[in-house]
Amino acid sequence: MRSIWKGSIAFGLVNVPIKVYAATETHDVSLHQVHDEDKGRIRYKRVCEFGHEVEYADIQRAYDDGDKTVVLTADDFKKLPEEQSHEIEVLEFVPVEQVDPMMFEKSYYLEPDSRSPKAYVLLRETLAKTDRLAIVQFTLRQKTRLGVLRVNDDVILLQGLLWGDEVRAADFKSLDASVKVSANELKMSSSLVDSMSTDFDPDRYTDEYQAELQQLIDAKLEAGDDIDTEKTFGERAEEAEGEGGDVIDLMAALRASVDKNRSSRSSSRSSSSRTGGAGSRSSSGSRSSSGSADDDTDDSTKKPAARKTTAAKKTAAPKSTASKSTASNSTSRKAPARKPAAKKKAS
């Protein structure tokens, strides 16, 4: 990584020299504009409203209040004390829970920049022990910013904050309506949360749009612009559109969601157990063969089966597995006796 700038943290009378690094990066595929006829790249020229092309060195910043326009030159900005400041000033220490995550902006790693990192380690250990955030003020790209210092693993993290007046209030009239949530709905919703609860692992999630965009670009690079993108990628879009629908019964939707997640977890657990010793636990040849088939099947092929189970459960009243099998057996035994009745009714 390459540092953005060097500076220091003013921690009371303690000065902590640091280097600042961007802690995040984008994975978005970089695109540019071209002329569709000749594939020539689109370039932009800086032109003023009077039609003159202007060099970048001749451009100044200005403010217009509606009646007058004042121009601010580079010398004007140099007079501002914050522009040349490379000091992160600690203003106060606050409890972690008092800073709403909605106020967080971009994050930066701070590396000690001195022969002895003792002051850096002292500040890091103090933040970790007291479970506090250091509210700081700093200047980056000619703007005075608010931020916090916190510990991430063994590194001090500088995280930008929005100013208080930059957070908008949520004023929605639709939330003023009185809505009653029943105890059963709340219980079923809590069961859904419980069935979906796990530990957060960011590596489990991927940006599918960017991944498919890169696949599309690679395919076009290999085959040229004549590739049938509608045939290659359009089918998945149609499948995604077909999965939607209006939810009419909230309780039914919650119950089906709980059943789906429980079924999915149960199948994944049974697959894992079969992988560890499928042969010893198999009670018949058919189960053994199905176990080996599941072992070779990835998660993407298991999900449709879970969806079919959910769809079947949506159309019928929720019952336990045992009661369903009992009902099925009794129905099959009574079927011959019911056929004549059905014919009589038809006549």
Image (tube, rainbow, N blue to C red):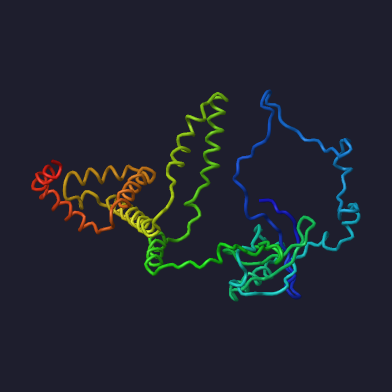
Is 150 located above or below residue 265 in the figure? below
Is 42 located above or below residue 117 in the figure? above
Residue placed at 52% from the left, 35% from the top?
215
Nearer-the-camera pick, 214 or 50: 50
Q: Position of residue 97 (x, y in %)?
A: 58, 72
Is 118 located above or below residue 83 in the figure? below
Nearer-the-camera pick, 23 or 209: 209
Task: Please tell me in which quadrant of the rendered image residue 138 appears.
Answer: bottom right
Task: Please tell me in which quadrant of the rendered image residue 99 appears.
Answer: bottom right
Residue placed at 59% from the left, 45% from the top?
27
Q: Quadrant of the C terminus?
A: top left
In this picture, residue 311 sits left or right of residue 210: left
Q: Position of residue 80 (x, y in %)?
A: 87, 61
Q: Position of residue 136 (x, y in %)?
A: 71, 68
Q: How many marks?
A: 0
Residue placed at 39% from the left, 69% from the top?
183
In this picture, residue 19 sits left or right of residue 255: right
Task: Please tell me in which quadrant of the rendered image residue 3 appears.
Answer: bottom right
Q: Position of residue 277 (x, y in %)?
A: 25, 52
In this picture, residue 147 sits left or right of residue 258: right
In this picture, residue 87 sits left or right of residue 204: right
Is 7 located above or below residue 119 in the figure? above
